[in-house]
Amino acid sequence: MGLYENQEHVLDAEHRQHEIFRAMTPGQRWEQFLSLRTTAWKLKRAGVKSLHPELPETEIETMVREYFLHART
């Protein structure tokens, strides 16, 4: 069986996640957003740094900012 041949568990998890988010207050959802955003920035920064270890910190920060400025969903 392949990874996505039976996606029922994925749909169950998504449904449960939506229930959890609906039960949150707007403030809790905002805090969750900020936490996810911070994690995304840290991961992108680590990725850029691993690809370009020779760059100064200021250049890495500029590259990360540019990435998120032009990111698409």
Image (cartoon, rainbow, N blue to C red):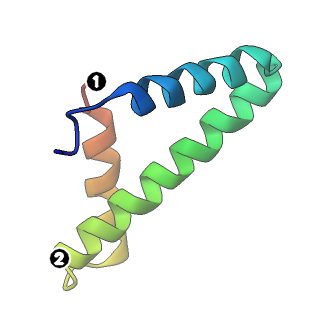
Q: Nearer the viewer, residue 26 or 19?
A: 19
Residue at 34% x, 58% y is 44
Comes first in the chain, label 2 or label 1 = 2
Residue at 25% x, 56% y is 63
Q: Position of residue 6 (x, y in %)?
A: 28, 31
- Is there CB contact under 8 Å for labels 2 and 1? no
Residue at 19% x, 85% y is 54
**Quarter of the figure with residue 62:** bottom left
Disc 2 marks which amino acid?
A: His
Q: Quadrant of the N terminus?
A: top left
**In the image as oriented, which residue stretches furthest toward the bottom?**
54
Q: Nearer the viewer, residue 59 or 5?
A: 5
Helix, strand or loop at mark 2: loop
Q: Which residue is mark 2?
A: 52
Q: Is residue 26 left or right of residue 45?
A: right
Q: Position of residue 21 (x, y in %)?
A: 68, 22
Q: Nearer the viewer, residue 14 or 44?
A: 14
